[in-house]
Image (cartoon, rainbow, N blue to C red):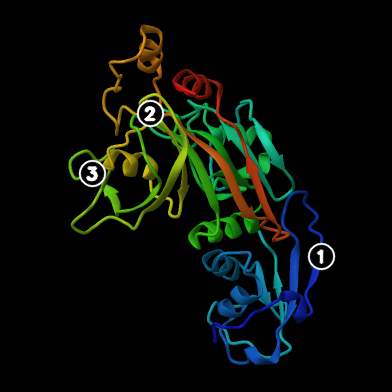
């Protein structure tokens, strides 16, 4: 099949039929255009239904939830112009975590996605040592349909002690679209990072990131091969007393990317015990500020701005959220102006 076709399903006699079950996707019907003569069913369906992943569509063909001329079919069956394809999306629970009543600071929500402001200390996914009390548990309580989506609709994550904006898909179509936007580097993410250094000017850090060779819980920069491409842009947001507030833009999204890159450039984030080591306290500060710095026990990193294309309307949407109280108080204390 040619790969340069710009297909719009509305051109191919699609007919959406409302599903009986609330919250389930609509049934879709297609009349196959003549140019698809002789092509495999799974490839044609993938072109006509770009909102679903290829692997998901293949599963639905095998389970009989995608039918060709009202009959069950095989993935490799060939189609002809005028054939009728019926797609009956079936959402099955992807996760078994329990819903928990957790207060979510929701910045935006519609039927396709939600954007929230994650507080410090909230773990995103259940895991070893954090089987409950996570963002996933809270999302399941907020909207039970999230159980049908991979990772409860979460398409990107923030570390436990990083605060700020996160997007969450509410439908399988939205999840696939937002994941694709991330993979194509179309999502714009800006962070504010308070670092223990007087930074003169902004720059770009381009250095591969991978697992640390000895400590598998940590990531590190790989300068002699290995790791994955990682690109971080930063500029000075505000100069402070022996510190700088940086505005950081991610071009890629590797695990711990900002923390690893800034530490590698000798600009450790305040409070980051993993990559920054012991808190650096300047000698020329008063005792109150010294204590405030020493007691800041998380990385001073905040996801402040998020820009995406809406997964359903394709409208450019952007949200911005200010610093959390603890980080703002520290910035104010270090402000020398």
Mark 3 = which residue?
212
Q: Secondary structure at mark 3?
A: loop
Q: N-terminal of the two: label 1 or label 2?
A: 1
- Horizontal side, residue 48 vs residue 260: left or right: right
What is the crowding at mark 3: few (fewer than 14 residues within 10 Å), some, or many (at least 20)? some
Q: Is residue 233 above or below residue 331?
A: below
Q: Is residue 213 above or below residue 311?
A: above
- Horizontal side, residue 79 vs residue 180: left or right: right
Where is residue 212 drawn, in percent x and y? 23, 44
Where is residue 224 drawn, in percent x and y? 18, 57
> What residue sits 60% from the left and 66% below the top?
60
**Who is closer to the viewer here, 302 or 201?**
201
Residue 243, labelled with which disc? 2
Mark 1 = which residue?
17
Q: CA distance from mark 3 to mark 1?
A: 51 Å
Q: Secondary structure at mark 1?
A: strand
Q: Nearer the viewer, mark 3 or mark 2?
A: 2
What is the crowding at mark 2: few (fewer than 14 residues within 10 Å), some, or many (at least 20)? many
- Horizontal side, residue 327 vs residue 52: left or right: left
Query: Which quadrant would residue 82 be assigned to in this image?
Result: bottom right
Q: Is residue 278 above or below residue 13?
A: above
Q: CA distance from mark 3 to mark 2?
A: 27 Å
**Who is closer to the viewer here, 157 or 285?**
285
Q: Residue furthest top?
A: 287
Where is residue 270 drawn, in percent x and y? 37, 27
Tag 1–tag 2 contact (CB < 8 Å): no
Where is residue 59 drawn, in percent x and y? 55, 65
Q: N-terminal of the two: label 3 or label 1?
A: 1
> What residue sits 58% from the left and 68% below the top?
57
Q: Is residue 336 above or below residue 164?
A: above
The reply to whether residue 109 is visible in this rendering is yes
Q: Nearer the viewer, mark 1 or mark 2?
A: 2
């Amino acid at each position: 099949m040619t790969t340069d076709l710009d297909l719009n399903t509305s051109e191919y006699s699609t007919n959406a039929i409302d599903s009986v079950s609330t919250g389930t996707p609509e049934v879709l019907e297609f009349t196959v255009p003549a140019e698809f003569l002789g092509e495999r069913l799974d490839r044609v369906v993938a072109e006509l239904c770009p909102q679903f992943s290829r692997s998901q569509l293949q599963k639905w063909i095998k389970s009989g939830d995608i039918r060709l001329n009202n009959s069950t079919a095989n993935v490799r069956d060939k189609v002809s112009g005028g054939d009728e394809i019926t797609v009956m999306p079936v959402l099955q629970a992807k996760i078994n975590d329990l819903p928990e009543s957790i207060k979510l600071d929701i910045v935006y929500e519609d039927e396709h996605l939600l954007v929230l402001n994650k507080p410090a200390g909230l773990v995103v996914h259940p895991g070893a040592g954090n089987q409950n009390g996570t963002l996933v548990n809270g999302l399941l309580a907020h909207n039970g349909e999230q159980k049908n989506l991979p990772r409860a609709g979460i398409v990107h994550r923030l570390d436990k002690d990083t605060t700020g904006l996160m997007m969450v898909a509410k439908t399988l179509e939205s999840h696939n679209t937002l994941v694709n936007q991330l993979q194509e580097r179309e999502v714009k993410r800006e962070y504010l990072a308070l670092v223990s250094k007087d930074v003169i000017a902004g720059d770009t850090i381009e250095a591969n990131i991978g697992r640390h060779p000895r400590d598998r819980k940590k990531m590190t920069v790989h300068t002699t091969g290995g790791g994955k491409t990682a690109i971080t842009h930063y500029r000075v947001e505000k100069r402070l007393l022996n510190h700088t507030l940086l505005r950081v833009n991610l071009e890629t999204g590797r695990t711990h990317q900002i923390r690893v890159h800034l530490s590698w450039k000798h600009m450790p984030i305040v409070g980051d015990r993993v990559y920054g080591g012991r808190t650096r306290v300047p000698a020329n500060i008063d005792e109150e500020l010294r204590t405030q710095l020493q007691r800041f026990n998380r990385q001073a990193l905040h996801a402040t701005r998020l820009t995406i294309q809406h997964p359903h309307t394709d409208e450019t949407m952007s949200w911005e959220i200010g610093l959390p109280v603890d980080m703002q108080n520290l910035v104010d204390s270090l402000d020398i102006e």
